[in-house]
Image (cartoon, rainbow, N blue to C red):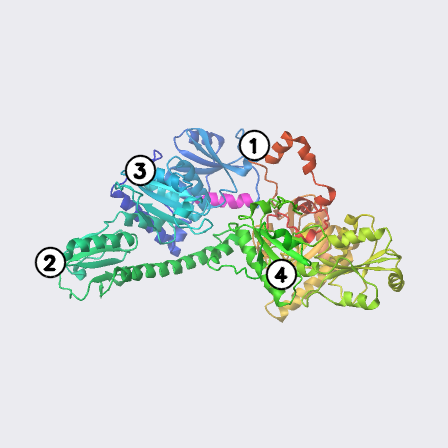
Amino acid sequence: MLLPSFPMSYVRTTHPCLSMMWLRVTFFLLCTSAAGCTDMFNMSGLLLEFTAVEFYDKMNSGKMVFIYFENQASQTISLFLGELKKSADVLKDYGILVGKINCKKEMVPLYCTKEMMQHSAFLFRDGKEFLSFDLDTVFDINSIVSEVLFAILRDEVKYVHSDADLLVMEKSVRGKKDIVLSYVSSLGTQEHRSVMETAYVYGSKYQFILITGGPVLKHLGIHRTSPLSRVWFLHCRAPYSDRCPLTPMRTPLSTLSLHTFLQLMDAPLLSEVYEDPSAVPSPQFPYQQTPQLFLFSNSETEQLDRDTARTLAWRLRGIALLTLVHRKSPAVTTPVEYNAAYRLPDKGSEVKYLTLKNLDELLELFLHHEGDEELEEEECNIEDDVSNGELEDEIVASVYVNRGHMVHMDSITQLTSDDFLDAVSQSGLTVVLFYLKWDAVSIAFLSSYTEVAERLADAGIDDVHMSAVDCGEWTDLCAARPVGPRPISFQPITAFPSVLLFRPQEPTREYRGLLGCEPLLRFLLLSRPTSPQILSTQQEVTSFLRGTPHPELQPDRIVGLFRTHTHSGVAVFNEAAKSLRGRVLSALLTDALAQEWAADLSVNLPAVLVFPSWKRDSQPSVLPLFSSVDNLVSHVDAELLHPLPELTVENLPSFLSLGKALLLLFVGEEEDEIGLRQNKVLLEEMRGVLESGGERMERYLTCWIHLGRTPAGMSVLGSYLGSMPPLPALVLTHLPSSHEVYEYPFNTPITAQSVLQWLQRVEEAKESPAGMLEKDDWPPSVKFYDFLKIMDEEEPGFAKQRAPKKEDQEVEADELNAGEATTDSSYHTPHHSEL
């Protein structure tokens, strides 16, 4: 949105020209909704690139300068620069210059030499650095404009936390200014930008207050976890003896709606006329879109009618303009049977007359109509925001859209500090969700969690007890403090949501999988059976290999074969089976039964048989017994891996954890039988690559993504190459030694021999990369923010304590990125930029 230029002296006008200025705002808003105008405004030039000399000149020009020092190119930086370019068109209207400096061409001491500077943008004023912004806080045009204006106006836009703070602010401006109080759920949003743009224009007329939460919301009647942005107008300019009267804005927050609302607050509370409503002109600018309500006054009750009208006007302020019609005038010819009338803005000059018994009927007419309209418009706007990608966090967007649908928690048990230990000590498996009501991820996952409970109940599974703990209410329990004389058997909860599994006489286990219904349900169903199961008859073995805890499951299985149950390797196998519990069904065979199986398979005891779910009706893979649990688990994981797996959102973390380069084929959705055959041919060629490549292909993970079943793959492919190439597309990425991404020539048929030759050229550095993976290492913006380093320096012993053991390293996300095999690798999500 474009606003007129204002001098940086912060002198703002309240003259009639302000209305003319906002006419321009309205024109731009309406114009940008039309295709032609949009094209016109998108014809802005490139982002200004300053030389070092120009930079110093601009710093001393008296204007504020918002600058980014570009050191290296990446997908994230390119996206940021695109948003910075958009914001330049907006910020220039506030007298703020926006640009960048290419540090490879122009060396600016300090800002181009320190690596941490590339993660920040800087605002300069009066030749000095005024403020720096981390790029994760100025990631799009809304956040850039709102944060920069917020920084400029930080001495003018106040913040209150409690109702007592608000009362102090009311007293300080009473008789001088009205207050515009705005609540935004988070900074850097479109709503935050709208508030700051309006505050810049109206800052000398009103006292602006911005809040993002706090007890003051309770005073305003808003739940502190509400994602809806709100605005209230506090009428403090008149010398009221008590609190300032408050009027809420009932429309979704935007720059235009906020401007319209403020104009309505300046409208007379009550107008009086001496003619029929039909003769009264329709409201003129800026009130032309506001309904008009008429009440009739009789001469004998004139003062009472005026008081009644004023009371109603306060309740309808911001919704309708109220006019009192005096019947004592001979120009008023409306029949006495009517006591009210109204005119709607979309009905022109048409006036409708009413006979009402009380004022509540009028309030119901306007408030109910307004409320329905607001709700309908708000839902539409939210859906548009989500579809247009304006709500970037998909989890928050999901919670935002479904905020009116309360999660029914009848299927789970709410635990407290009083009954927690008794609940988890019962027989069977007790699953406990630790969550926070104001955490978007917790609320989103709570719906899936309750669905799991319902599906378990529908399946007649009564040995899995689904429970939850609200850590906002039971902080002592979530902090793992002893309950009375009895200790807690888990570490303090530090991440939300967290799911822990409790069994009597067994260590507590943490669910580390994806936060969805299907992954959690599968994990719990595979966690029910004993691990490992002790099999003593051939019938039990057959039941184990062919049975399943649930009809839809196709679990992987492992079987340990030992001569005797006292063999030293049994303990290693048992620990490995417990580590794999929830992912793999495991069983133990000993004595004669184990020897019979070993003879049939011609293997030496002890041995571990692996039955992958994808390898049906075929001989199992045979592993020797390894001396350590970690080695055994990693080799089992390798055997369970499909030679040409299809990547999905669910299994991607486990494949990335292998640390291999991805030879990744993207195929589109089959629209007909021909497309289906083409995809089958492509997969056969990729299998040919594996067979012909032999040991050479062990360094790569050859895999594929079906974009019809996994639409997220389109974003992945776009982030790799910067744009969407024609399908099918074959890329080589996640190389252990570099961040390059290579694209197989799209005009070359994908055949096994051609792919192998292309890989050879890549290995010999004869192919140019098509893109770069973004680095995940974002250091603290300043040394003081490196809290872990500070803790290590203050308590050296803590560093050793915090250093993970080898087995812990294998379950950390950083180690997943580095390619270490894990004991629970499929349940960790590495932080890769394309996801």
Residue 420 lies, in percent from the top left, at: 61, 52
Q: Look at discs 4 and 3 and give the one toward the viewer.
A: 3
Local secondary structure at mark 2 = loop
Mark 4 Cα shell of 10 Å, populated few (<14), some (14-19), many (≥20)? some
Dot 1 corresponds to which residue? 784
Q: Is residue 425 left or right of residue 305?
A: right
- Determine crowd level at label 1: few under 14, some 14-19, many 20+ residues with C-alpha closer than 10 A: few
Looking at the picture, how far across and down is residue 456, in whole percent?
A: 63, 64
- In the picture, measured across the screen, residue 404 lies left or right of residue 299, that is right
What type of secondary structure mainly makes up the magenta span?
A: helix
Would you name the residue on which mark 3 appears? Answer: 173
Please tell me which of labels 4 and 3 falls first in the chain.
3
Earlier along the polypeptide chain: callout 1 or callout 3? Answer: 3
What span is in magenta? 76-86
* Residue 814 seen anywhere in this rendered image of the structure: yes
Q: Secondary structure at mark 3?
A: helix
Determine the CA span between mark 1 and mark 3.
Answer: 38 Å
Relative height, residue 350 to residue 211 (above, below)? below
Q: Disc 1 or 4, which lies upstream in sequence?
A: 4
Calculate the distance from the C-alpha at mark 4 to the C-alpha at mark 3.
56 Å
Residues marked 1 and 2 touching at CB (< 8 Å): no
Does residue 696 appear in the picture of this structure?
no
Q: CA distance from mark 1 to mark 2?
A: 75 Å
Q: Secondary structure at mark 4?
A: helix
For the residue marked with disc 2, what is the amino acid?
Answer: Ser
